[in-house]
Amino acid sequence: MPANWRRALVVMAHPDDPEYGVAAAVAEWTAAGREVSYLLATRGEAGIAGLPPAQSGPLREAEQRRAAAQVGVSGVDFLEYPDGRLQESPALRRDIARAIRIHRPDGVVTLNHRDTWGPGAWNSQDHQVLGRSVLNAVADAANEWIFPELAAEGLAPHTVAWTAVSSPWPTHAVTVSPESLERAVRSLMAHERYLRALADIPVEEQARRQVDLVTGGGESPRVGFELYGYELLEG
């Protein structure tokens, strides 16, 4: 993974997406003094069975803010797109590009944009749409002509050095400490109401299983990423 950077923007579709994939890496980065912010396209209001969106949205937003705090992230913003109905559009690309120009990160972290997570594991449309939109918005943020209204808002173009995708086909990885693993577990546990609705398994057990799955467990836990831009930059 790139080493000489200080600011990253994590862009995901829903509350809990950072915690299911990259929270251990985020904990590692913030422990090293790097600045990480979160941008969520939706509030995940369609994610809890039996709980109407008007109640679920604010609850899930609050859970996401608590989850982010566990791994050293204080900046959490929401774009307010409808959960479960994300579509690739110029508007979504523009809103992500705007956030990139505001935060001016060295790197952007996002979701798997492909159809599956592997054999027999379908990836949701929101994840696919968001991942592709982020990859396009990174280019948009650097281009002065695609969304000229952003310049009119006083937001100058910004070039991102690398984009890291939480992917089942990683090209790079972040080694994480036991402390970062524990922070990642606590971060996912902050989605308590969401996890309780998912399964009759204790919340902590669900969180530990997921963090172990993502990091490989064992003696050398790592979070894998598929990197875009970095190899070209280095080459």
Image (cartoon, rainbow, N blue to C red):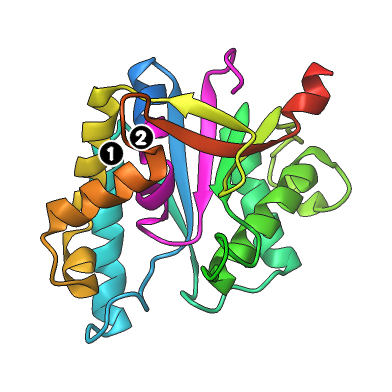
Going by the image, does 229 lie left or right of 123? right
- Give the mark nearer the N terminus: 2 vs 1: 2
Going by the image, does 189 lie left or right of 27? left
Q: Is residue 75 visible?
A: no
Asked whether 19 falls inside the magenta stretch, the response is yes
Of 65 and 151, the residue lying toward us = 65
What amino acid type should be assigned to the residue bearing mark 1? Ala
Going by the image, does 35 lie left or right of 73? right
Of 72 and 121, the residue lying toward us = 121
Dividing the picture into quadrants, the one containing residue 125 is bottom right
Going by the image, does 98 lie left or right of 61? right
Q: Is residue 38 above or below residue 55?
A: above
Q: Is residue 112 above or below residue 84?
A: above
x and y percent of residue 69 in the render? 26, 38
Of 78 and 173, the residue lying toward us = 173
Q: Residues within 10 Å of mark 1 (few under 14, many from 20)?
A: many
**Residue at numbered disc 2:** 24
Dividing the picture into quadrants, the one containing residue 215 is top left
Asked whether 201 falls inside the magenta stretch, the response is no
Dividing the picture into quadrants, the one containing residue 49 is bottom left
Q: Are marks 2 and 1 in contact (CB under 8 Å)?
A: yes
**Residue at numbered disc 1:** 184
x and y percent of residue 191 in the render? 23, 57
Q: How far is mark 2 from mark 1, CA to CA? A: 5 Å
Element carrying mark 1: helix
